[in-house]
Image (cartoon, helix red, strand yellow):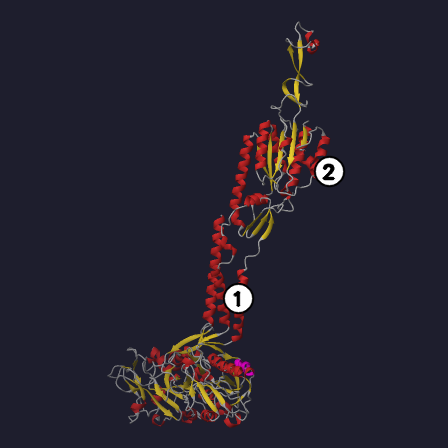
Amino acid sequence: MLLIGPIGFLTPWILAALAALPVLWLILRAMPPSPKLVRFPGTRLLLGLKDPHPVARHTPWWLLLLRVLAIAALILGFAGPVWKPSPDQAGQGPLLVVMDAGWAAAPDWPQRQARALRALDRAAAAGQPAALLVADGTATGALPFLPATELAAQLRALRPAAWETRYPPDPQAALAEAPAGLSVLWLSDGLDHPGRAEWLAALAGRGGVTVVPPDGPRQSLELVAGDQPALRLRSTGAAAADVLAIGLDPQGTPRELARLRPGEGGGASADAGVTSWLVPIDLPSELRNRITRFEVEGHGSAGAVLLADDSLRRRKVALAGDDRAGEGQRLLSPLHYLRRALAPTTDLIEGGLGDVLQASPDVIVLADQFGLAEEPGLREWVEGGGLLIRFAGPRMAASERLAEEPLLPVRLRAGGRDIGGALAWGEPRSVAPFAADGPFAGLSVPQDATVRAQLLAEPAPDLGDRTIAQLSDGTPLVTRAALGQGQLVLFHTTANAEWSNLAISGLFVEMLDRLVRSARVGSAAPEADRAEQPFWLPELVLDGFGRTTEPQDATPVAAADFARGPAPGAPAGLYRGGERVAALNAGGPMAPADWPGARIERAAEAPGLDLRGWLVALAAVLFALDALGSAWLARGRQGATA
Amino acid sequence: MKPQADQLRAGAEAASAALPALMLSAERLAAALVPGAHGQRRAGMGEDFWQYRPATAGDTARSIDWRRSARSDAQFVRDREAQVAQSAAIWVSAAAGMDYTGNAERPSKRDRADLLALALAMALLAGGERVALAGQPPRPGRLQAERMAEALVARAPLPGDEDAPPAEALRPGQRVILFDDFLGDPQPVLDYLARAAGLGVQGALLQVLDPDEEGFPWRGAVLFRSASGALRHDTRDAAGLRAAYLARLAERRAQLTGAARMAGWHFGTHDTGAAPSQALLWLWSVLEG
């Protein structure tokens, strides 16, 4: 770079073309060619005539000046002028560029490349060797120091990886060939990664370290397991962008299906420089089942993309029990109402209890089934994370051994209770408003939903905690209890209209939907069945910018590596193992990096003001003026002759 | 006969083929001229019968027509129609500028003027006139056309820009036709016209010009040079001179038209881009009237 006063030139040799300007001046001056010689008998008639426009003899000086200035502006513009370029603070020694190349580096990747290229240009101009440490976990061995010009192509071809930034494990080994007096430019992604402190110490011991912090906050997206699926959005900044839920619309076109706003569901919590928001995925099941990915709006990074897999998808619901539809009374069958309520949003399995258990459903619904103690495997299934929803009914009420019945959230009193019958005093009870912290929070209760009969629970100290819905007189309508990792839910009334008209109200559908959504998807952790699924094949991978691509080489990933998250060889993406599809998502916890002892380059001083565009624009304006001036001159001449 | 003269003559024959025989009116010719083929529609010397009239005192006995007189008591004299011979002089400028043509496909002004002159001469000769180039004795007959063609072709162009018609060759009663571009000094022509008017000579001026000279199509920087190189004019904006040039050309034509009318002459223009018969018809109509 050549510095003239406050202006630096990136390619100063182009300025040599300025020497041609005087020649150009002369050529432009001599533009009117020597006159044409014409033998003309009428010359006598011409004698003594004056030229009407003697200005045409030479190009007027101002037009000439305009053209020369325009060309000078072009030459200066192409010489790459920079107003007050940033001083070459990186020192004069051999250059080491450390590029953080994980997903966190993706959003401002071009600026990082440009900054590193600038440093390489300077090293090349100074004749210093340079090395490039790409911290994407693939660098091995000692870093080779090469002439800086040879690294530019490699640097341009670099792309951020779809996993976290990873430094080579041993700084001393990697820096074995490093000459003394190193000047280090560290293009950080702003986050702390394993080994960073060791590297910083090792590099600081060999020369000055200049750190270029990232431009803007980093954001990451993570799925939070729980009753209600939710996203955790983390950001190193104070504000959060919206989260877009993207999927196929009914026409099969990928589009934005929903927009989740952080801060609406849960408050923000700040911790050590990272703010995180809990974003509940509060969407209808039909919509949620179509979502293929979530992404933070305007943040092109693999960490800000969350691919949806089975854990977000439809629940597998098994209906087991007494289906009396075969006898021709369809509307009396409790399973009929359940089927109609669950079919739109879930995958339904029907059959005997033993059959459906083998299909490993997420939810099993039993209507008025009794005597489950003998059912093999049901208890184990619930303890392994299943959700068992049971409905009461006449058979259960008639049982004498109801108190010993297992797999119920509460102990039931035998006999039941008939409220609105002909022999009863009371009126049918309506459903009380739901508690604000229960699973049915926010559902509106229709006034005409009434219950005529129910099974009553034995009073117990924890009955109130287990009741998630009750009638207007305080008796439980729905109770819930945990069993192992699973849950037991009991509706104290029937699933058909025999005891209650709840089953024919819209509330019934919404309640079931809430319950099913709270079910855990079977075996959410892939490592749980390592023996069953030893390898995962990539089906769709993300690049560092969060864009989906076809996997280049479908190398199977061992389940043990898969469980450790994205890594070299296992980029973030969708992986298939047998029947199941699991997503490997890059986003996760973040910790901002600190740089003791290093010089941090502030963004304001970095680039200097590039004057090239202005000068080229000036040249264009001058040429336009020149065209106007020429046209004006020509028009003046023609106007005189006409 | 030279080949060029042959060609010129053939071209002139073709040009004059469509023209009816031109009969020159001879109203102003004096009687004492060589008899020619033109009846004067009055009694005089001639060969054709004109009228019988009663003899008067002074008529010689020899003049009495006895065959007519024998049919009555009076004596009659047989008058013949007076006949005079018309002579025409044709002059074609030999100035260097006449060799100009603005386009190789067009004939030069000199070629066109020669062609017109010879065609006119043939038409006149076919009408029995006596024709010659100015300064030479006029003769009748077809052979005269060949002589004129030879003389026109053999004549070398003058080195200078100026050529004036020979005023000393003017004879009373002549008809004179001048072919020139009239772009040189106009004064000799004006003098010539004045002297011709004084001698009672009538005629016509035909200005033969190239389309370039009438249109002035040049633009930009041009150095104009006269045919001999004696005159030159330098300009940077030839298109800007066009209006002034055309104005001067019109002024020159107006001057010549005025002078011609004063002398009883006619002034016409001819463009070498146009057909020659047009100019020939004009000359014919002018000379007949």
Q: Nearer the viewer, residue A374 or B58?
A: B58
The numbered mark 1 sits on a residue in which chain?
A: A
Q: Provide the residue designation for mark 1.
A: A22
**Residue A546: in sight, yes or no?**
no
Left-right relation of A555 to A379: right
Question: Marks 1 and 2: same chain?
Answer: no
Residue carrying label 2: B6
Q: Is A315 on the left-hand or right-hand side of B129? A: left
Q: A532 above or below B43? A: below
B136 relative to A148, above or below: above
In the rendered view, would you say B140 is above or below A137? above
Residue A576 placement (x, y as % from top left)? 51, 85
Location of residue A1 in the rendering, given as x and y in whole percent from the top left corner: 50, 78
Q: Along the horizontal axis of the image, is A482 left or right of A15?
A: left
Outermost residue to the left:
A425
Q: Quadrant of residue B157?
A: top right
Q: Residue furthest right?
A: B1
Residue A36 visible to the viewer: yes
Task: State the extent of the magenta-drawn residues as a range.
Answer: A150-157
| Prevailing secondary structure class for the magenta stretch in the rendered image | helix
Q: A482 or B8: nearer the eye? A: B8
Query: In front: mark 1 or mark 2?
Result: 1
Q: Position of residue A253 (x, y in %)?
A: 47, 73
Q: What kind of element bears circle 1?
A: helix
Inspect the image, locate mark 2, and give the three-letter code of the amino acid beneath it: Asp
